[in-house]
Amino acid sequence: MHTLRSVARLGYRAPHVLDLARAVSSGDLDLESLQSTDEPSEQLRDRLLEINGVGAYSAANLLIILGRYDFIPVDSWARKLVSHEWHGGKSVRSTEVEAAFERWGEWKGLAYWFWDWSYLASD
């Protein structure tokens, strides 16, 4: 645990990473099955959320990596981006981030990932 915290600099995430590694190593969790499942994204998201340390933001990112684009990884950065893009810098909530990309339906996560936010990089 010390190595994960200090050398890998995982901090509070270290116990979750260790639990995940143990579950995969023991065969209790088959990560490969996440790539090949044909279950709906909502169910796959629920499975991801059952993994200790995986929250909504992580699950949305993992779904995108798995080729599922139904969810957006909403965090403070996403709120800032949407605030500047569509709300003139006014603070927005997670629901407004979701609403901003809803028009892309099942592809909204992909649209979010590839949106050109480069003009905000200097903020």
Image (tube, rainbow, N blue to C red):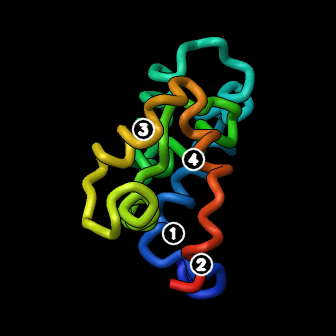
Q: CA distance from mark 3 to mark 2?
A: 31 Å
Instruction: Give coordinates of residue 28: x percent, y percent.
Output: 58, 33
Residue at horizontal 37 percent and vertical 48 percent from the top: 97
Q: CA distance from mark 2 to mark 4?
A: 16 Å
Give the residue number, with chain letter if any, for mark 4: 112
Residue at horizontal 62 percent and vertical 30 percent from the top: 68
Viewer-proximal residue among 53 and 19: 53
Name the secondary structure under disc 2.
loop
Name the secondary structure under disc 3.
helix
Three-letter amino acid code at disc 4?
A: Tyr
Viewer-proximal residue among 57 and 87: 87
Residue at horizontal 67 percent and vertical 17 percent from the top: 37
Residue at horizontal 58 percent and vertical 13 percent from the top: 39
Give the residue number, with chain letter if any, for mark 1: 14
Three-letter amino acid code at disc 1?
A: Ala
Marks 4,3: beta carbons within 8 A:
no
Q: Which of the two discs, 4 and 3, labels the residue nearer the N terminus?
A: 3
Q: Which of the two discs, 2 and 4, labels the residue nearer the N terminus?
A: 4
Give the residue number, with chain letter if any, for mark 2: 121
Q: How many labels were placed on the picture?
A: 4
Three-letter amino acid code at disc 3?
A: Leu
Viewer-proximal residue among 97 and 62: 97
